[in-house]
Amino acid sequence: MRTAQTTVRRMQDLTVAEHRLTVPLVWADADDERTLEVFAAVISRPGGENLPHLVFLQGGPGHEAPRPFHAPSSPAWLDTALQHFRVVMLDQRGTGRSTPVSDDLLSLGDERAAEYLTHLRADSIVRDAEALHEALGIERWSLLGQSFGGFTTLAYLSTDASSLQSVFITGGLSTIDRHPDEVYALCYEKMQTASEQYYRRFPEHRERMRALVDLAAAGELVLPDGEIVSVSRLRSVGSALGTNDGWQTLWSLLELDPRTNAFRYDLAAAMPYGGRNPLYYVFHESSYASGQATRWSAERMTPVAFDEDPTLFTGEHIQSSWTETVPAFRPWRGVAMRLAEHEWPKIYDAEAIAASGVTGAAAVYLNDVYVPYEFSMETARLLPGVHPWVTNEHEHNGLRSGPVLQRLIDIADGSAVR
């Protein structure tokens, strides 16, 4: 591992130190000569140059860290964080400026491309973070893990807890020992509840959704990129219901005439798993695998109720058929099929997590449709020093509101009650 370059920039009143590291693709194999570059930006305000470090671990998988601007261009939590920390925005390997994955990886062929992606998991992200930790000469730092970033935090606690001062987790207390089938089955229950709640508020939209389902079944919903929208893809707009204001996105879409450009473009924007971040689709189910193959878990676990009522929305439930119907995913079909059969190694160590002694706080969203409350609380019991704040004030993206982080900081230092 070597530091490739460090650049210091000024962004308004922020100082941004950009670091690039060249690291092994395969940390566990010293004979593998493949490398990639990892990018991180260390952000501080005037007077905050000596504050402790807080590493932000982004959700996803497949998304880079936010860029260092002030809200609204960056999330509101950044201003809060900079009052207490120097913030390290780490682009997780395969994203942003950390040797990003794009369609050119497919030139390796399906088998080699799939093998490459197996080295982009949370355990490798932890190794990259530790390399940065060493390069910066920091004794200990803290973590802020959002969603998949929380999963990565748990992987960090499994191997390198001694590097951590404290942890803050938002919507990311993943199960560490349950099968992905159990997770997706429970997420379907959450989405059925969210769907019924939405239709109780806007009952006229159920018939509009039914009409859209009929159009999709007839192949009459076509997006600007040429995608003929399947019924399963249409239903995935329900993913928006997992966010604080996502119902507004859904409401606005269902109010539009499906024959218009406005509807076609808004539908394309509302459906999750776009082509910008192929990892988010191809790699998604692996984030719940620890010692298992996923084998299209969400697809296999579809409940009878969802087969019988196509107006029920789905969330982060990917379908293998999208590799045939979504233009951005077709080139990735062979890779996705291989990854679905891959036996993923165990990534969490319950004993090490329980012995970590780490302190901090975690926001657990009672109605979370992506990371179920029930399984989050199982994991929380392994971390007595990380105080869970269970709330129905926010959905899965509550961190973006700003106050969530300050609440967690106050809970961790004892100045606020849970």
Image: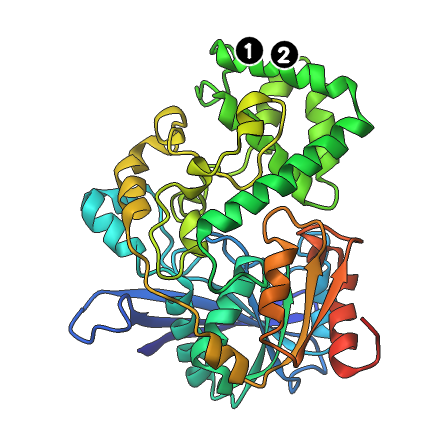
Give the residue type that dot 1 points to.
Leu
189 vs 69: above or below: above
Residue at (37, 68) in percent of width and height:
124
Q: Quadrant of the N terminus?
A: bottom left
Residue 417 in view in this figure: yes
Determine which residue is flagged by label 2: 211
Asked which quadrant contains residue 36, the reply is: bottom left
Is there CB contact under 8 Å for labels 1 and 2? yes
309 vs 350: above or below: above
Horizontally, residue 189 falls left or right of residue 27, namely: right
Q: Badge 1: few (under 14), some or many (20 or more) residues near its Cα, within 10 Å?
A: some
Measured Cα–Cα span from mark 1 to mark 2: 6 Å
Residue at (61, 38) in percent of width and height:
239
Asked which quadrant contains residue 192, the reply is: top right
Give the residue type that dot 2 points to.
Ala
Determine which residue is flagged by label 1: 215
Q: Nearer the viewer, residue 117 or 18?
A: 117
12 vs 160: above or below: above
Q: Badge 2: few (under 14), some or many (20 or more) residues near its Cα, within 10 Å?
A: some
Q: Secondary structure at mark 1?
A: helix
Q: Secondary structure at mark 2?
A: helix
Residue 256 in view in this figure: no
Horizontally, residue 191 falls left or right of residue 101, namely: right
Q: Nearer the viewer, residue 34 or 287?
A: 287
Residue 330 position within the rendered picture, expressed as x and y whole percent measured from the top left = 33, 31
Asked which quadrant contains residue 92, the reply is: bottom left
Residue 66 position within the rendered picture, expressed as x and y whole percent measured from the top left = 58, 58
